[in-house]
């Protein structure tokens, strides 16, 4: 009789994602992944080949379930400047039950410099966040709510840099005194 898998792949990816997000790629052992997912080592290897493949699956899961879904919610807001600000405030307030920072940014710092495939994934994900900022700025410009002369393409890049910085800071120190000035600077850019 053929073996039948007894797990739900999105649940396994979510559990692995949380382990990698909390401990990093290097800091997460196969024993950690066995514990987090509830699958035995053989089942993990059968389903995902190796730790790196599971990491890529977890990173893609994170991007779809967290980043894409969150930005799509923000796109629904009528006020595009409020949508941008909501993205920054979400970083400040965090998400209960999830590790701090952002798995994509963490991957950018830890894994992407040594792995071209992961570098491509994180670059695409971060590019989509910058595109979100650009879309919001264009909408605000069309509504006449941006300061005259504000260069929207450059501003989207600046906002992306500030977002990455905020994510790194909040990962290291969730209550850093640097958070409030960053948020204030975003408010001033959008004024």
Image: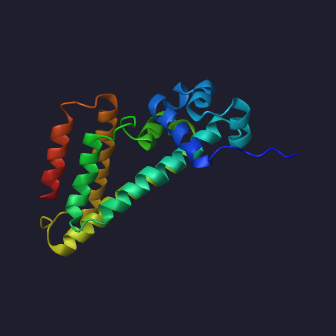
For residue 125, above or below residue 40: below
- Residue closer to the observer: 191 or 9: 9
From the viewer's perspective, is 32 left or right of 62? right
Res 83 quadrant in image: bottom left
Residue 75 in percent (x, y) is at 32, 64
Q: Percent from the top left, x then y, of residue 180?
A: 16, 39
Q: Nearer the viewer, residue 9 or 89?
A: 9
Q: Position of residue 43 (x, y in %)?
A: 72, 36
Picture quadrant of residue 106: top left
- Residue 116 in view here: no
Q: Quadrant of the C terminus?
A: bottom left
Residue found 16% across the figure and 58% down from its top: 190
- Color encoding of the figure: rainbow
As drawn, 98 above or below 120: above
Residue 27 visible in image: yes
Position of the N terminus, as image quadrant, is top right
User: Which residue occupies the foreground of this view, 167 or 42?
Assistant: 42
Q: Residue at x 30, y 46 (%)?
A: 163
* 182 left or right of 42 in image: left
* Above or below 72: residue 9: above
At x 85%, y 46%, the residue is 2
What residue occupies the far bottom of the structure in this picture? 142
Residue sitting farthest toward the right: 1
Picture mark count: 0
Residue drawn 24% across the image and 47% down it: 89
x and y percentages locating residue 158 in the rendered image: 27, 51
């Amino acid at each position: 009789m053929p073996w039948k898998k007894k797990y739900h792949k999105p649940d396994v990816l979510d559990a692995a994602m949380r382990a990698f997000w909390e401990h990093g790629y290097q800091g997460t052992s196969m024993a950690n992944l066995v514990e987090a997912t509830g699958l035995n080592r053989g089942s993990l290897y059968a389903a995902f080949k190796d730790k790196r493949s599971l990491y890529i699956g977890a990173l893609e899961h994170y991007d779809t379930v967290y980043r894409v879904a969150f930005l799509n919610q923000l796109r629904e807001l009528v006020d595009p400047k409020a949508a941008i600000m909501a993205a920054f405030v979400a970083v400040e307030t965090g998400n209960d039950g999830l590790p701090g920072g952002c798995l994509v940014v963490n991957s950018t710092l830890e894994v992407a410099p040594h792995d071209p495939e992961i570098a491509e994934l994180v670059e695409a994900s971060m590019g989509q966040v910058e595109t979100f900022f650009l879309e919001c700025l264009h909408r605000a410009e069309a509504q006449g709510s941006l300061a005259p002369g504000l260069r929207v393409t450059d501003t989207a890049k600046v906002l992306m840099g500030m977002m990455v910085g905020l994510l790194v800071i909040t990962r290291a120190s969730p209550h850093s005194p640097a958070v409030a000035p960053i948020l204030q600077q975003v408010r001033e850019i959008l004024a």
